[in-house]
Structure formats: structure tokens, C-alpha cells
Image: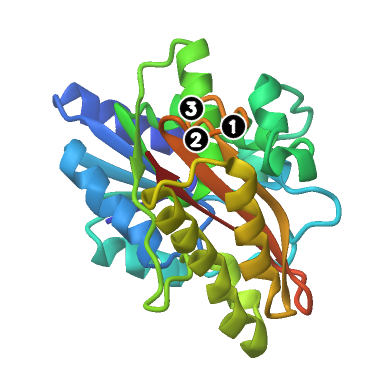
Amino acid sequence: MKVIKSIDDMRGYSSAAKKSGKTIALVPTMGALHEGHLSLLVLARGFCDVSVMSVFVNPTQFGPSEDFDKYPRDLSRDCGLAESAGCDCLFAPSAAEMYPAGYGTYVDVGPIGGMLCGAARPGHFRGVATVVLKLFNITAPDAAVFGAKDAQQAAVIRSVVKDLNLPVRIVTAPIIREPDGLAMSSRNAYLTAAERKQAVKISESLFEAKTLFDGGERSAELIKKRIVSTINGGGLIRSEYVEIVDPASLRPLDVIDGAAMIAVACRALESKTRLIDNVVVG
């Protein structure tokens, strides 16, 4: 596996691959890799000839009171895991490389960036869209793979690709879960032992919601109330939002009469960790 840290070198690598007739799949990450990230790599290798994983903790998507400084970073470990999963090239630029002095251009993603997580994290998806567009321009991928856990992120990127006519196929990979059902996340490491035990209520609430839907329930309000009751029942995890939305536009639904995404964001009260999860029904 080749490790590249400069934009010019990354462009050179991608250009050489393209000239030899190879296709490129990009897996954008912020590192602290786990099995969920590695599953994206496996999927990427099925779509294209060359797999590129980016590892970059993007400062522009963190708010002033968020966890940018303490976000886990271990490039050596990430390189080992990525290589073990068959990654061909790992791109790990510095913040100064990506945002040099005088940088001032950002992507306005419109209303879709202000819904769900965007309502609690203003500017977050502006930062996400900006760095992903930069990564697309640097790595020149034919396809890019995102995890379904970050469903709003995937929807935002699909919107950017469509609106800006980018020649990149967006692939969404299934959520990878711990044995007890908790969605894998780099931030799970922040949880206290007691919080970790109760965090399983997040996925349990979504599985219960799917069971309600499969049993014929179509009222979004009733399903949301059941989810909130399950998540908040333990005392250490609190729901930040519970929404049932159209999977593409993210617009809220009152009645589930077709495909719908049930999305939740929660806060662990001791560690202040924010966790998200979702399930699609219909």
C-alpha cells in the first residue's frame, strides 16, 4: 500500500492510474478506523480497480465546542488496518496542505444541510461538502463509498454531485454493528462503561420501530414516541432528535406511505458523546 501526504503526489498517483486504464474508488474517512470503515474498502474494491482511502480529520466540519482536538488519531494503526483490508493507496494530508493560508472557498449545500444533524451543528455540512469536493478533485475517483450510518452526509454528497455535475458514482454501504447492535463509530471509544451498556438502546429502539412498521403502524408520531421512550429509559442516554424522513430529500413525514428513514441522534450524559443511527423501512 502506498501512503501519500501531498496533494501533488496524490494527483500524480491518480493520473498514472487513469492513464493505465484503471478506475478509482475513494473511501473518505477521518481515521480511527474500525470494521465499518474496512467494510467500505471491501465494497470499493468490488467497484473499481484501485482503492484509495483518505484519512483526514477535517477541521471545517467541527464546531467551536466540538471534539476536534480530542478526536482519536493514530495514522500508523490506520495504515496497518487499511493495508490489511486491501487498500491500494492511503491519502493522509495535513490541515495546512488542505487549507493553506488564505483559504476562503466553501460549498453552500442549501436546505438539506440544515436538517437533522445540521440543525444542531450549523456549518457542519458546509465543511463536509467542501472537504469531499476537494478530495474528489484531488483523487479523481470514478466512485466514492460512504457508510449508511452517516445517512445525512451521504444525502448531502449525492445532492452536491447532482447539482455540480460531478462524474462520481456515490455508493452507500450498509451499517456495520457491534455484536449487541450498536452502530460502529470512532466516537464509541468516548463512552463510559455504563454509557456503553445503555447505548444499545439506540439500535434497539430502531429495531422496535421497524417491527412496528412491519406490523402495520404508519403513524410517524406514534413510532417516534416509542423510540424516545426506549432510548431515554436507561438514564444515561438522551435523544437529541428522532425524525422520520424521506430518504432522499430528508423532509419529515407524518405518515409512512412509502420508503422512509428513521433517524436518531443521541447524547451520552456523562461523556457528552454524540451518537447517530438510522434504519430504513418501506
At 48% across and 48% down in the image, what residue appears?
5
Query: Label 3 vs label 2: CA separation?
Result: 14 Å
Q: Tell me which corner region of the image, top left, top right, bottom left or bottom right, holds residue 13.
A: top left
Q: Quadrant of the N terminus?
A: bottom left
Task: Name the residue nearer the viewer: 158 or 144.
Answer: 158
Q: Secondary structure at mark 1?
A: loop
What is the three-letter code of the residue carrying label 1?
Leu
Can the viewer see residue 108? no
On screen, 238 above or below 21? below
Q: Point out which mark residue 256 bears.
A: 2
Tag nearer the camera, 3 or 2: 2
Calculate the distance from the C-alpha at mark 1 to the C-alpha at mark 2: 6 Å
User: Which is closer to the viewer, label 3 or label 1?
Assistant: 1
Identify the residue under disc 3: 248
Q: Is residue 51 left or right of residue 265?
A: left
Q: Residue at x 42, y 67 (%)?
A: 34
Q: In which quarter of the view is residue 281 placed?
A: top left
The answer to which quarter of the image holds residue 167 is top left
